Amino acid sequence: MILLQAAPSWDLVIALAFVIGVTYGFIMLRDRILVMLLSLYAGIMVANLVAEPIQKFFSGDIALLNKIWVKSSASPFMIKTIIFGVVILIINAKGGITGRRSQFNFFEVGAYSFFNVCIGLSARFSFMDPDKLKAYTDVSKLTSLLGEHQTLWFVAPLIVVIATIPGVVHQ
């Protein structure tokens, strides 16, 4: 007898994020997928670089202009997640790639969309406290897959770029 869970698991939520992300990638097409990929890399970098000073400001350790300080209980995860999201939104709102236009084939659009979702989710998991992440990875196979193979998700789009450049791969 198979018992069904009463509440959806994190694997279902992650699978839904993949379906939505890949579908959105096919809607965005070439230029927007690459801008999204670059914004994910930039968002991770900026979030990891500026989260600590912002955390100190929100915990009351640093005053802004020696006059303004804030005392709050904002977690490092929340601060990094907000910075990550803001950077992605700004770059995607303002960004665009100009130059020679070429069409991606079905494989390229699908691969870039898939890796965009992988990078976005694994970045969020990397922002988590290790104890909280362990709690999620214990109950979700997809969370552990995304968290444990973060380097793969960062490198894989670059491999796709190299593999799909005309003349690089022998036909």
Image: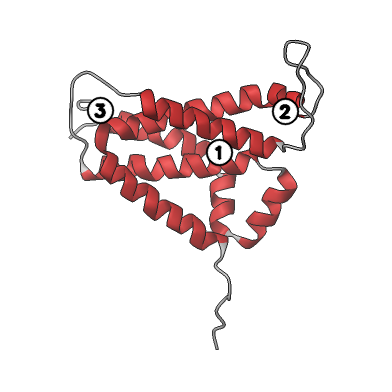
Number of other residues with Cα within 10 Å of mark 1, as a class: few under 14, some 14 to 19, many 20 or more? many
- Residue 119, x across and y down, in percent: 48, 39
Of residue 127 and residue 141, the one placed in the foreground of this image is 127
Q: Residue at x 58, y 76 (%)?
A: 6
Q: CA distance from mark 3 to mark 1?
A: 27 Å
Q: Secondary structure at mark 3?
A: loop
| Quarter residue 122 falls in | top right
Residue pointed to by mark 1: 123
Sequence order check, earlier mark of 3 and 1: 1
Residue pointed to by mark 2: 55
Q: Residue at x 74, y 23 (%)?
A: 57
Side of 150 where 68 appears, left or right: right
Numbered tag placed on residue 165 in the rendering: 3
Amino acid of disc 1: Ala
Number of other residues with Cα within 10 Å of mark 3, as a class: few under 14, some 14 to 19, many 20 or more? few
Q: Secondary structure at mark 1?
A: helix
